[in-house]
Image: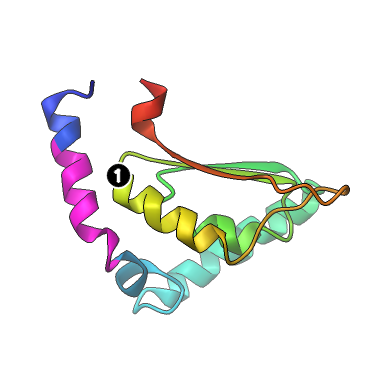
Amino acid sequence: MLAPAKLELARQFDELAGTWDARCGPHSSHRSEFAARIRYLRALCTSLDRPRVLDLGCATGQTLLYLSDLAAAGVGVDISPLMILYARRNGTKRVFTNKGGTRKWRCGCVYLLQ
């Protein structure tokens, strides 16, 4: 069980989950910052030759989606169950594949790590 402060934090992010992509995603007013971060991470993935990616605080999984074609696997973790729900929905749009074509997409709530 999470401490009350962490439960409150999860609740606050749950409230933002439905509008997170519009506020912070690739098509939001923060698109230039998002694009710069993605350019850096894509270059890093390329230099590491399809690494496995762990996104802590993944929110709706947008970063993992933009790395899916350059990473061997991706795991997103967030404290907000609703953010994870959106990440899983977004994850059906693109999937990671290894050389054998196996899907390697996972998202989970931090509650599972307790």
Q: Nearer the viewer, residue 107 or 40?
A: 107
Q: Is residue 45 visible?
A: yes
* Residue at x 57%, y 55% (from the top left corner): 64
Determine crowd level at label 1: few under 14, some 14-19, many 20+ residues with C-alpha closer than 10 A: many
Q: Which residue is drawn at 34% across and 79% down?
A: 29
> Splitting the image into 4 quarters, where does residue 46 fall?
bottom right
Residue shown at the point (88%, 47%) measured from the top left: 100
Name the image quarter holding the C terminus.
top left
Q: Residue at x 79, y 51 (%)?
A: 47
Q: In the rendered view, does 77 fall on the left or right side of 35?
A: left
Q: Is residue 5 magenta?
A: no
Residue 59 visible in the shown view? no
Amino acid type, residue under disc 1 in the picture: Ser
- Drawn side of residue 109 relative to residue 44, left or right: left
Depth check: give the residue in front, 79 or 93.
93
Q: Is residue 54 left or right of residue 83?
A: right
Badge 1 marks a residue whose secondary structure is loop
Residue 74 position in % (x across, y down): 62, 45
Q: Position of residue 62 (x, y in %)?
A: 49, 61
Q: Give the range drawn in magenta.
A: 8-19
Q: In the rendered image of this protein, does residue 93 appear above or below residue 77?
A: below
Residue at image mark 1: 80
Q: Main secondary structure of the magenta part?
A: helix
On screen, 20 above or below 71?
below
Residue 70, x across and y down, in percent? 74, 57
Q: In which quarter of the image is residue 94?
A: bottom right
Comparing 19 with 56, the one in front is: 19
* x then y, percent, for residue 88: 48, 53
Q: Which colour scheme is used?
A: rainbow
Q: Does 9 appear in magenta? A: yes
Location of the N terminus by quadrant is: top left
